[in-house]
Image (cartoon, helix red, strand yellow):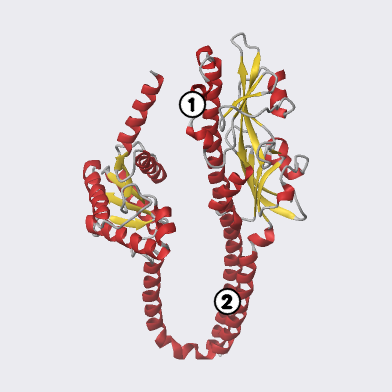
């Protein structure tokens, strides 16, 4: 009787504990769902914001060059063909950018990036022209979306004032960015999988939206409560009413550089928790079945004690196998991003404790998107396997940790390794990849190559693993900028950048 009572009490405690644990897990899963959705949206708007700001900055450099050229009397006196060649660079004709207009003080077209002798054209009634005609402002002006008179397409106009030597108004230099260009950026960043992603122009006008709706282009949402919330700070998140449509949305937003542009990703809460609802139903059903089963199997408890140890051993072995699978990249057999983060954090702590150097190599396949587009993703997978084999051949598995951390991105952690030795390892990997001589038509090298960035503590004054990754990533970016198929060391890359900066100021 006492045994039965204790067994019943244990049964009730087990059921209560199972319910409590299940409720806790469900709550944590709900928090994780919201956190993952926000991280995904935040990453998307940050990537898009950086791309858009960089493209506007590059286009603005072309406008500045035209403004500076128009200020020079010797340029103005040149023949039209030579003046056109001096004023307009190749960036002015890049894909997605419209014609650059040079307008005189009456709004008449003097010249354009597309034609030495432009057709008769007047833009005196345009918003940007009227603004500069009445304001002594030398800054870049970004105008609300409008339909171009030249192309008939939706554009955002970027413009700058041209002044006479005495500071009086001499005209305007204006260029257009097609809204379809932003649509291409949205598609490339995967905005179609992140709810509703919107780019707002000056005055809260819709410049681009995914899912795309041409009827919403140019529509102002400036008076909506959610847009007013976006204007309060440069970036953040909140739950508010939809700007277009009904219901609430979970907004993640950011401002694009220092321009009057904003980006937001809006997801209905029901979409954020859709998977969680399904998991809740599944887990709830499982818990009910387990509780019923626990009651039924209570009388078998004593007989099953002898098998418990063996079952635990099998479970432990399975968990070990699952742990291995969870930290291994299925395609290449290298460690995955999860193992990379854990290993780097562990080696970082050990390096700080023992004051021994720690080197990190980041590698990236050059022009890999072009390889996939031309040869297909199956060939791309084979190429990634070859890169992985090259990394394994150049590293010591008992000492070094090789990982695949992204699509075509790899990393090698080298504990207790100086930068010189790490650079030797990185060069071996680079040479091994090139040695396969896998044809790659989209790569100027003609074969598959990799570029790498190397950072090493304490050579790099990084305060945490993330800073070391950032330093290696900056060196990788420098290697890409310098022609690819090369390895750059973080300190070397930083020194080169300082030298380039000093040369630019001299």
Of residue 120 and residue 276, the one placed in the foreground of this image is 120
Whether tag 1 and tag 2 are in contact, CB under 8 A, the answer is: no
Q: Split into 4 quadrants, where in the image is the N terminus?
A: bottom right
Q: Nearer the viewer, mark 1 or mark 2?
A: 1
- Callout 1: 10 Å neighbours few (<14), some, many (20+)? few
Of residue 3 and residue 395, the one placed in the foreground of this image is 395
Give the mark nearest the N terminus, 1 or 2: 2
Residue 85: mark: 1
Residue found at x 57% / y 89%: 296
Label 2 sits on residue: 13
Q: Quadrant of residue 17?
A: bottom right
Residue 5: mark: none
Give the x, y percent position of residue 6: 54, 83
Of residue 245 and residue 300, the one placed in the foreground of this image is 245
Give the x, y percent position of residue 242: 74, 51
- Callout 2: 10 Å neighbours few (<14), some, many (20+)? few
SS at badge 2: helix
Give the x, y percent position of residue 378: 40, 66
Residue found at x 26% / y 48%: 426
Of residue 464 and residue 180, the one placed in the foreground of this image is 180
Residue found at x 77% / y 43%: 224
Q: Is residue 419 above or below residue 127?
A: below
Q: Split into 4 quadrants, where in the image is the C terminus?
A: top left
């Amino acid at each position: 009787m006492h045994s039965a009572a204790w067994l019943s009490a244990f049964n009730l405690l087990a059921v209560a504990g199972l319910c409590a644990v299940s409720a806790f897990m469900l709550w944590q899963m709900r928090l994780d769902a919201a956190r993952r959705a926000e991280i995904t949206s935040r990453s998307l708007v940050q990537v898009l914001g950086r791309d858009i700001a960089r493209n506007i900055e590059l286009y603005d450099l072309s406008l500045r060059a035209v403004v500076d050229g128009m200020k020079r009397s010797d340029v103005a006196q040149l023949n039209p063909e030579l003046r056109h060649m001096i004023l307009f660079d190749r960036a002015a004709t890049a894909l997605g950018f419209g014609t650059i207009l040079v307008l005189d003080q009456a709004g008449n077209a003097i010249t354009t990036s597309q034609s030495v002798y432009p057709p008769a054209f007047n833009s005196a009634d345009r918003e940007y022209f009227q603004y500069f005609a009445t304001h002594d402002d030398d800054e870049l002006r970004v105008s609300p979306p409008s339909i171009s008179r030249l192309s008939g397409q939706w554009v955002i106009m970027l413009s700058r004032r041209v002044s006479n030597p005495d500071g009086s108004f001499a005209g305007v230099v204006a260029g257009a960015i097609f809204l379809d260009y932003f649509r291409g950026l949205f598609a490339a960043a995967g905005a179609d999988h992140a709810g509703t992603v919107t780019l707002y122009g000056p005055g809260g006008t819709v410049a681009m939206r995914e899912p795309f709706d041409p009827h919403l282009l140019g529509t102002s949402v400036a008076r909506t409560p959610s847009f007013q919330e976006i204007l309060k700070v440069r970036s953040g998140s909140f739950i508010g009413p939809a700007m277009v449509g009904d219901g609430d949305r979970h907004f993640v937003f950011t401002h694009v550089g220092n321009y009057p542009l904003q980006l937001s990703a809006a997801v209905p809460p029901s979409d954020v928790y859709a998977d969680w609802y399904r998991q809740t139903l599944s887990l709830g059903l499982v818990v009910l079945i387990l509780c019923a089963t626990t009651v039924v199997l209570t009388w078998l408890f004593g007989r099953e004690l002898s098998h418990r140890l063996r079952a635990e051993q099998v479970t432990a072995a399975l968990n070990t196998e699952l742990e291995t699978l969870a930290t291994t990249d299925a395609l290449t057999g290298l460690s995955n991003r999860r193992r990379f983060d854990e290993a780097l954090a562990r080696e970082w702590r050990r390096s700080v404790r023992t004051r021994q150097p720690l080197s990190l190599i980041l590698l990236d396949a050059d022009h890999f998107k072009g390889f996939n587009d031309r040869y297909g993703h199956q060939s791309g997978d084979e190429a990634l396997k070859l890169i992985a084999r090259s990394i394994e051949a150049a590293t010591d598995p008992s000492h070094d940790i090789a990982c695949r951390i992204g699509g075509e991105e790899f990393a090698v952690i080298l504990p207790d390794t100086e930068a010189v030795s790490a650079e030797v390892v990185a060069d071996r990997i680079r040479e091994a990849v090139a040695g396969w001589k896998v044809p790659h038509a989209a790569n100027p090298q003609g074969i598959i190559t990799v570029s790498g960035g190397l950072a090493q503590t304490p050579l790099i004054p990084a305060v945490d693993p993330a800073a070391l990754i950032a330093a290696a990533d900056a060196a990788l970016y420098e290697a890409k900028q310098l022609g690819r198929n090369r390895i750059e060391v973080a300190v070397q890359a930083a020194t080169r950048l300082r030298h380039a900066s000093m040369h630019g100021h001299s």
